[in-house]
Amino acid sequence: MIFLLKLLVDFNTILLKLGRQLATVAIGLMVIIILIQVFFRYGLNSALPWPDEAARFLMLWMTGLIAPSAYRWGGFVSIEMLFRFLPSKMVKIITLILLVISLLVLVVGLQFGLKHVDSGWLFSSSSLKWPLHLIGMETTRVKLAWMYMSLPVGLIMMSLVNVELIIKNFLWLWNPNLQLPIDPDQPKTNGS
């Protein structure tokens, strides 16, 4: 079981690192696009039609790609006050139950996300177009499914992280002194 956990941790580490790199590119492009829009809107008094939607597109992808790392590192909001008053074993049991419930929510969310992507192929962006005219083809509008795809991609990555956390918590419940593989990219906190 530990060997399979190590494979999952290694896979998640590579996948999430790629996600963070792509999210960094997305937020950088988003800032550039917003600055272009500000320049054209207020500097030249001539707003462009596409930057708002392009920035929204990049924001959705940035969120879908970075959220799994935040989840893995415990970066989501949580209420831990109750855990301070409970025995360690009870905390591990409650955490395991909450992780299983979270996995169920992620699976349901993934089903809704995939349905949303399916409907996105029917509709096109109002302002974003593929620049196919550069290669001699007709310019076409970007299908909204490309934007909506950020949700299932993020949920799949979060589900993989959730499975990793479930296995780790189960093994820690079984043997609290067990040395389990960790994410080498996790930022160090003051307490570690």
Image: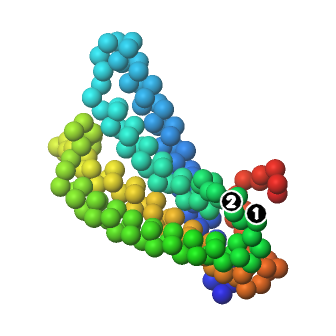
Residue beneath the point at 50% across and 54% down: 65
Residue 165's place in the image compared with 138, above or below, is below
Q: Secondary structure at mark 2?
A: loop
Residue 134 left/right relative to 14: left
**Numbered circle sitting on residue 37:** none
How far across and down, in percent of the image, does residue 53 sit?
32, 37
Quadrant holding the N terminus? bottom right
How far across and down, in percent of the image, does residue 36 sit?
41, 24
Circle 2 Cα neighbour tier, 10 Å, few/some/many (<14 / 14–19 / ≥20): few
Query: Residues at badges 1 and 2 in contact (C-beta under 8 Å)?
Result: yes
The answer to whether residue 52 is seen in the rendering is yes
Residue 147's place in the image compared with 107, above or below, is above
As rendered, which of 40 and 190 lies closer to the eye? Answer: 190
Residue 65 left/right relative to 109: right
Asked where in the image residue 150 lies, by quadrant, the reply is bottom left
Quadrant holding the C terminus? bottom right
Q: Which residue corresponds to mark 1? A: 84
As rendered, which of 182 and 107 lies closer to the eye? Answer: 107
Q: Amino acid at mark 1?
A: Arg
Residue 14's place in the image compared with 89, above or below, is above
The answer to whether residue 7 is seen in the rendering is no
How far across and down, in percent of the image, does residue 26 sit?
48, 43
Q: Amino acid at mark 2?
A: Glu
As rendered, which of 89 and 131 lies closer to the eye? Answer: 89
Q: Secondary structure at mark 1?
A: helix
How far across and down, in percent of the image, does residue 171 sit?
70, 82
**Numbered circle sitting on residue 80:** 2
Residue 161 left/right relative to 58: right
As rendered, which of 118 and 78 lies closer to the eye? Answer: 78
